[in-house]
Amino acid sequence: MLLLVFTLLPLTVFGTGHASDSKDQVDESVHTATNGVPFPWSKVRLPNYIVPVHYHLLIHPNLTALKFNGSAKIEIDVKNNTNWVVLHSKGLNITTATILDESEAHLSDRVLPVLEYPPHEQIAIFSPKILTSGEKYFLYLEFAAPLGDGFYGFYRSTYKTKTGETRILASTHFEPTSARTAFPCFDEPNFKANYSIRIRRQPTYIALSNMPIEQTVELTNGLLEDRFDTSVQMSSYLVAFVVCDFKHVTGRTSSGVEVSIYAIPDKWHQTHYALEAAVKILEFYETYFNIYYPLPKLDLIAIPDFQSGAMENWGLNTYRETALLFDPATSSASDQLWVTMVIGHELAHQWFGNLVTMEWWNDIWLNEGFARYMEFVSVDATYPELRVEDYFLHTCFAAIGRDSLNSSRPISCPAENPTQIKEMFDTVSYDKGACILHMLRHFLSDEVFQSGIVRYLKKYRFKNAKNEDLWESIANTCSEDEFTSGEHCYTNTQATKNAYLYAGEHMDLKTIMNTWTLQRGIPLVRVNLQGSKLYLKQERFIKTTLPGDPLWASLQKGFLWHIPLTFKTSHSRSDTRHLLDTESGVLDLDESVDWVKFNTDMNGYYIVHYEGDGWERLSAVLRHNFTALSHKDRANLIHSAFQLVTAGQLSLDTALNLITYLKSETHNVPLIQGFGYLEAFHKMVEKRKLSDVTQNVKAFILQFFQGVIDRQTWSDKGSISDRRLRSEVLSLACDLGYPPCLEKAKQFFNDWMKSNGKMSPPSDVIETVFCVGAQNHEGWMSLLEKYSTSMSEAEKDKILSALATSKDTTKLIRLLYLGMEGQVIKSMVLPSLIYSVARNPEGHNLAWNFVKKNWDRLVEKFQLGSFSIRTIIIGTTSQFSSKEELNDIKDFFESIKDESSQLRVTQVALENVEKNIVWLDRNLETLRTWLLKTLKLNDKELQ
């Protein structure tokens, strides 16, 4: 009896062979399969002695019945003798399982049973005959499942035509661990294989996959079967297929790659900008990486229901519509920048992630950090008018916000199960990863950095790599011949002669970078200028703990970074460099100086505190000659000052005095940075119903920055930077009730209403116009109706943001439940909608209560650990600043302990609220006093 075979077989049958692999062969702990018999594998990761070589997939979706079936014939390479094949499967009904030999003859005269172990999303197939090491076998499986109704795996999506007809399509999203929900597979990134895919469809649809169609065959039942070319070797999470009725535009790169942009037919006209951008950026990457894109085609497709921004599936990139489609009539300058950056990100992945893939998810930053950084590098090269380097600062500011909490994590850290893996797709992997790469590039030079990453890509192409492989590649960027001929690089054998010469110091690149990737947090560099000497000291920067607190010593213990410092002084014409790899140091200057500014242009990833009278000296520079510092340095000073205030290391009035110079500021980046902090203070005190402080923050902004506000035009004219500032400033001015702003916005909104929504306000101010219009019932209802019929996703996003600003809580509740239902408002935007409602002073408690009440439905819809769940948690809780609210959050997390205990984000949320509480306790009276004093002085000046 077959059941007895399972229960009585010795565990050594699972894998016999080389002693060196015994840790993967004998599995002493026993897990129970769904049918009650022992499951032969207990680890979350698959055994490594069976490796997939080639998948032959057949997929047949039924878009009427909303289900699919298929088959997988997987060529496997057996490394050690075994009777078992263990792989991944989740939610699939496997109807047939058998194993074939090299000639495709069955090893057994019967269908083999399949054991399932859902906690690890694994299945096991037992072969009556031992699979012999070195022999070729095929695992054949047939399966079926419903199309998913979420955003992962093989799922259904819908859209409405201009005439109101609902149409259905099916699309995939597999990263990180959802390929197993579409077909049985070895769903780990280091199991790279070739894929030959066939898709059956109705003639009214088209099918797309990673590779071009080799042949389309008409079947006897009226179906068509598209047979795609065999793919290059790739990880399972990069497999993709879509069945839809979309239209496309096509172009070709100079190297012959066919690039196509797909969208629903009614939005086909919004695809042209993306095509231009994709061709230009793909050509840039081929040149920069010195490696041709290895596939014959690249499709970019806008999916109507899509949870993340985009996904880099090799040869078939999938996008949210707002990340790919550009409508000149309704898309703002920010929308254009967003589309361009997302395309730059996904195309970078064709090399970083697809060609070279991280060995395991603990190093996902090798994919995402590089892609985030290269989106700036590529767009700066191909669209210099977008001035993306200015916005890279905000990427690092975001990283610091997370990294300065004790709940942060190292860039490279363990992640085993799917929830832990999903949480790795966060600010640390993306933004901090990008920032340390930027620091490294400026540390080494553009040429050394570029040659190093090209070497990395060439060495590991079609393979997997880990953290240290990158440093090794960058540290060995040329041959001995190249080195001796004077090339700008060195090899390990030459390291003792030269190494990276940085201010006369020899360095070990791997040791340096390990301090940035293997330990959490960000360093604070204390600078004390005394005459011609600079006294330096580094420590871990933490916002929530002061040096005198009992926990301080333990939170600082063991932290040391190798920091590539840069600085300029009142007397220097160029940057000075120094590698600080000790806790403290002293630098001798050539002469006494008036001031010093560290972290030039914020090319480094560290916070600087200027002790003694250092901040007063820099404030004086900003007031009297701010152009002595670059606009990036000015923005960096504003950011650092307020970060230090939050950490309790700088007084709030010192930081506020620093930004009073902004009424003379001529560059948009420092202005936006300063406005951002003032807006945050306004929202915080407004939500705490501190009416006197709220009114004075508002008065300060409108009085001190009236000139900046009044300079803004209600148009789409100017540079991208000017247009972004216009959007930010006018939005804030109207939100603060500035009469000229409200009057102009109401005029535009009334004209829009009279035209039945056909006359669109300038795209850069359209959201501000809608926000003002949404404050009365008629306007709010008109916007909701327009939302349901608009064919522009950019316009719909702006309408939704405006609807969430209503002061009518009944309307806000209605909005949230429309997002939950997913009919009028698609569920994919629910996380951002919850966040928008939470930002509304009338909605922040309402949004949090909605999350608590609907938690189970939200987790079912968006998956635990996903970016969406993190957005929901942080977006609602970060608005709180009282002990009562903190206790309520703790109570809720305790009530869902089974889930909350798996999430890092719950600790981030609690720490954020604790930070807000401490900030108000420490700074509220200072803020109140400073505002009164400053407003009185301003009144006197005006008299």
Image (cartoon, helix red, strand yellow):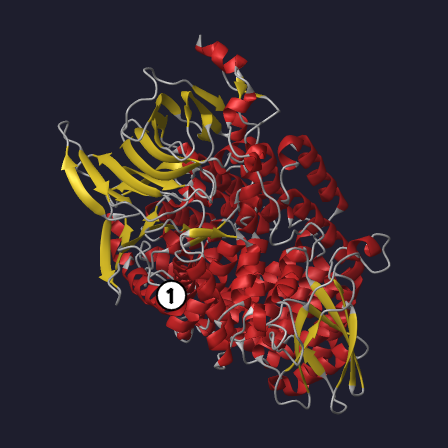
Q: Taking the image as drawn, is residue 150 in sight?
A: no
User: Which residue is pictured at 57% across the width and 57% down the height?
Assistant: 468
Front-lying residue, 334 or 748: 334
The 10 Å Cα crowd at callout 1, few under 14, some 14 to 19, many 20 or more, is: many
Along the line of sight, the residue nearer the viewer: 344 or 889: 344
Q: Is residue 243 visible?
A: yes
- In the rendered image, the vertical position of residue 393 relative to residue 819, given as above or below: below
Residue 169 on image: x %, y %: 30, 38
Q: Position of residue 95 (x, y in %)?
A: 35, 20
* Residue type at tag 1: Tyr
Outermost residue to the top: 1
The residue at the point 48 percent across, 13 percent down is 5
Please name the residue that numbered disc 1 is placed on: 285
Quadrant of res 22: top right
Secondary structure under tag 1 reads: helix
Up the image or down, 831 lies above or below 33; here it is below
Q: Nearer the viewer, residue 130 or 389?
A: 130
Q: Residue 875 appears at what percent x and percent y?
A: 59, 48
Q: Quadrant of the N terminus?
A: top left
Left or right, 685 with respect to 727, comes to right
**Numbered marks: total:** 1
When the figure is inspected, residue 530 is found, relative to residue 106, above or below; the finding is below
- The quadrant of the picture occupied by the C terminus is bottom right
Q: Is residue 804 left or right of residue 877?
A: left
Q: Is residue 913 above or below residue 34?
A: below
693 and 278: which one is in front? Answer: 278
Displayed quadrant of residue 767 = bottom left
- The picture places residue 191, in percent across and down from the top left corner, at 44, 42
Q: Is residue 177 left or right of residue 930?
A: left
